[in-house]
Amino acid sequence: MDPADSETVKIALRAQGTRLHQHEEQLGAINLGVRDLTGRQENFQASVNTQVNHLAEQLHRVLAHLEAGSSPQHPAVAHTPIVPADHVPLHAPPPRLASPERFSGDSGDCRPFIVHCDLHYKYNPAAFPTDHSKVAFMVSHLTGRAAAWATSEWARDSPTCNSLDVFTDTLTKVFNRTAPGREAARALMQIKKSQRRVSDYAIEFRTLAADSGWNSAALLDAFSSGLSDSIKDQLIPLDLPEDLDSVIALAVRIDNRLAERQKQRFKSVARLPRHQGDTPSHRPAWRPPTDTPPERRVLPSVSEEPMQLGRAKLTPEERLRRIQEGRCFYCGEQGHLLASCTAKDRAHQGRGGPW
């Protein structure tokens, strides 16, 4: 055979092998789709059977009412109104549940995904009559690495996909990287309230406590140890309850009251009047009077605040108070004003003033 023809045959065979591999992948995808359709068909059939049984029960009840109304042995029952079929008590419809968030395996914790799927199985049992349909539901909500693993198991008809318990256990072993009990216990020993509110601290504490496996006494000690010093000081004189929920509720109430008291303090400080020079950083230091000779001493006018020796300048608040109470700006007594204050006149005369 010509070498050129032999090479052509090899190329054709490789191309044919590639096509066969592609066909196998397509057949695998078609097989997966057919199984999914089969599961849906089973779910639909189960739902139809449930509805038929429900209608049969309603019909049986209506016939029973009709027979009771037409019976000659019980004439009093003949006047009893027949309950229409649409008034027969029906089973409550299943709750509307959101679709489970797709699980990729990257989070390292598949428990939320499994619990969300279990909610669908519990409250909509007619849609999932078999373990195979439940596993198909979980596989359809996987993505990324988890979807690649589940697709491989499903395509080769692995026994893992025939049992819900086996599938969830295997999924947990493959993609659950954490040990919930040990991780929660370690976190409980380190969690602190810090600058958070007690309510936020309690939420995180309850979440970890659910997985820790600790008894109530250990959880109570751990929660109390993580509180801030201000909350602990308030709890010391009290007889604490013996259950964790009551202690958490008590700590939350104390924290809320302390926060409310803090707000009241801030409001009181904000309402205080502020004047330039009132703060210690702006108030000028007091200086003693200079030894100015009497003949060069300048006396204040009637309209000015008293600045005589030994008397400090009145603050705006003190001026307002003396005006409201009718007191003298100089001596602080009632019954006269600064212009007619005798104490002021005597002070000026005693210091060699022109009076």
Image (tube, helix red, strand yellow):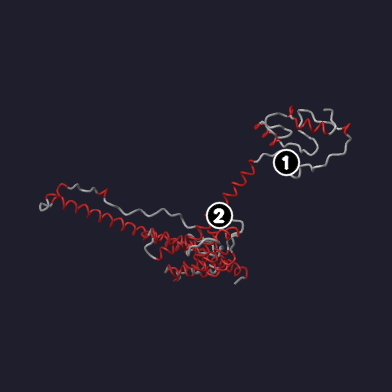
User: What residue sits 68% from the left and 29% below the top?
Assistant: 335
Residue to which mark 1 is pinned = 278
319 on left or right of 77: right
- Nearer mark to the viewer, of 2 and 1: 1
Distance from the alpha carbon under mark 2 to that under mark 1: 34 Å
Q: Secondary structure at mark 2?
A: helix
- Quadrant the C terminus occupies: top right
Q: Is residue 26 something one can see in this rendering?
A: no
Residue 6 location (% of width, % of height): 60, 70
Q: Nearer the viewer, residue 14 or 260?
A: 260
Q: Nearer the viewer, residue 286 or 72?
A: 286
318 on left or right of 353: left
How many marks do you count on the picture?
2
Q: Nearer the viewer, residue 201 or 298?
A: 298
- Quadrant the N terminus occupies: bottom right
Identify the mark at residue 255; answer none if there is no mark: 2
Q: Residues within 10 Å of mark 2 (few under 14, many from 20)?
A: some
